[in-house]
Image (spheres, rainbow, N blue to C red):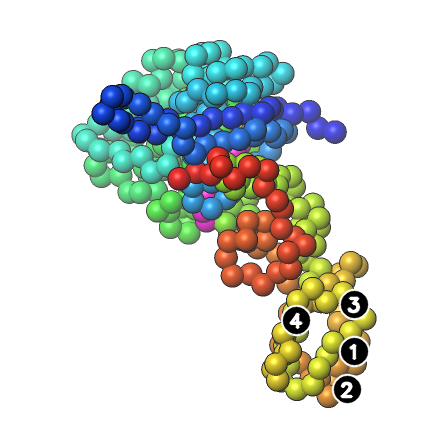
């Protein structure tokens, strides 16, 4: 088993929401947050952090980067445990954060920005600018940088000090396809060098083509985590066949497990097979239905992607799935607002 490079144990946090009263104008109440978050990330891995809006993804990244202090739990980096990275420089210096959509403005240049920040950790600015593809824009005014160039600069600031853990919050926002491809290639290169990377993004297609693992947050809790292939196998999302037809009743003809059906003149059924749907198995079923007057006009083996996993485990979206793939939550009162 691969040793964890980043280990999160029972990390919890609740936002303090202003709730002033006449007698106590500074009174606050506990709001949404994170509840008992635990997971391990192997060294050099790229993990996707996904979940619906308000799931707690950015809050988690803020805790891991030392921008917020957790209420309880611990963060372990390379076998060194920290209770609060906000108060522990030794741990915080091991983590780099690329925040969501930084607006770089003014007459300063990328070289000047990195030079000022590098005074705190003696980083080599020239090497960083070259690494993120800004060598030709080192003396360009920030006001003249494109969105893609701005994202590269944000990544360069996150890499100051050569952090062991790199946190990326919506790094693909505003990037064209070419820039997205370049960013993914750079991210993979960093992982190959041993950097452990956690990426939060709503662009699931881009994320899935890059990550090795996924952590799904919902209502401030880890609903499911692990390698994508193993998650799909456990949720049985790649073992479902969708059939639609216009005549007859196909149910008596099907020996496999039917997990969803609608028979009203036009019919639609979802069929599960533990061994998957080979061409031979699929052809045999379609022939059987056709010979008995239930000719299907739509045959589709459901191939799950990250959006399917998100829909299946949270119930958010329009995917027509059985409740057998739903993962229960332990406590809903910590839902993000």
Instruction: Please tell me the numbered disc located at residue 256.
Output: 3
Q: For numbered disc 1, what is the local secondary structure?
A: helix
Q: Would you place residue 249 above or below residue 112 in this image?
A: below
The answer to whether mark 2 and mark 1 are in CB contact below 8 A is yes
CA distance separating discs 4 and 1:
13 Å
According to the image, label 1 marks what residue? 253
Q: Which residues are magenta?
A: 196-203
Residue in view at x 40 percent, y 39 percent: 337
Question: Label 3 crowding class (10 Å Cα cut-off): few <14, some 14-19, many 20+?
Answer: few
Quadrant of the image occupied by residue 78:
top right
Q: Give whichever of discs 4 and 2 has the lower sequence position.
A: 4
Q: Decide: few, some or many residues near mark 1? Use Cα within 10 Å; few <14, some 14-19, many ≥20.
A: few
Task: Answer with left or right where residue 116 lies relative to residue 94.
Answer: left
Sequence-wise, the earlier of marks 2 and 1 is 1
Q: Nearer the viewer, residue 5 or 152?
A: 5
Camera-side residue of 175 and 185: 175
Q: Main secondary structure of the magenta part?
A: strand
Question: Of label 4 and label 1, which has the lower sequence position?
Answer: 1
Label ID, residue 261: 4
Q: Residue at position x 65%, y 41% from top? A: 227
Position of 189 with respect to 262 (left or right) is left
Say if the magenta span includes residue 316: no
Q: In this view of the protein, which residue sits in the foreground, 189 or 198? A: 198
Residue that numbered label 2 is attached to: 292
User: Residue 222: percent from the left, percent from the top?
Assistant: 57, 37
The answer for how far apart the CA atoms under marks 3 and 1 are is 9 Å
Dot 2: few (<14), some (14–19), or many (≥20) neighbours within 10 Å?
Answer: few
């Amino acid at each position: 088993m691969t040793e964890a490079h980043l280990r999160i144990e029972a990390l919890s946090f609740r936002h303090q929401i202003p709730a002033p009263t006449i007698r106590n104008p500074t009174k606050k109440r506990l709001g949404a947050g994170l509840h008992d978050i635990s997971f391990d990330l192997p060294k050099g891995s790229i993990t996707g952090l996904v979940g619906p809006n308000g799931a707690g993804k950015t809050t988690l990244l803020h805790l891991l980067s030392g921008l917020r202090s957790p209420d309880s739990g611990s963060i372990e980096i390379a076998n060194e445990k920290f209770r609060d990275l906000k108060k522990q420089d030794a741990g915080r210096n091991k983590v780099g954060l690329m925040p969501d959509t930084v607006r770089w403005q003014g007459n300063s240049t990328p070289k000047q920005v990195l030079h000022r920040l590098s005074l705190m950790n003696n980083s080599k600015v020239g090497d960083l600018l070259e690494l993120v593809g800004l060598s030709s824009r080192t003396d360009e005014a920030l006001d003249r940088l494109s969105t893609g160039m701005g994202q590269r600069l944000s990544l360069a600031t996150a890499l100051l000090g050569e952090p062991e853990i790199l946190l990326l919050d919506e790094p693909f926002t505003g990037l064209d396809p070419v820039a997205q491809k370049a960013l993914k290639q750079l991210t993979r290169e960093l992982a190959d060098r041993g950097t452990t990377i956690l990426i939060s993004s709503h662009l699931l297609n881009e994320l899935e083509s890059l990550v090795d693992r996924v952590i799904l947050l919902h209502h401030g809790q880890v609903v499911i985590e692990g390698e994508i292939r193993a998650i799909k196998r456990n949720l049985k999302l790649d073992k479902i066949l969708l059939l639609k037809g216009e005549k007859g009743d196909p149910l008596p003809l099907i020996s496999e497990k039917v997990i969803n059906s609608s028979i009203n003149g036009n019919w639609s059924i979802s069929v599960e097979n533990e061994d998957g749907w080979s061409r031979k198995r699929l052809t045999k079923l379609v022939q059987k239905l056709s010979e008995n007057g239930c000719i299907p006009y739509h045959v589709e083996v459901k191939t799950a992607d990250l959006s399917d996993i998100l829909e299946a485990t949270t119930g958010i979206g329009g995917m027509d799935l059985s409740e057998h793939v739903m993962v229960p939550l332990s406590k809903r009162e910590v839902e993000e607002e």
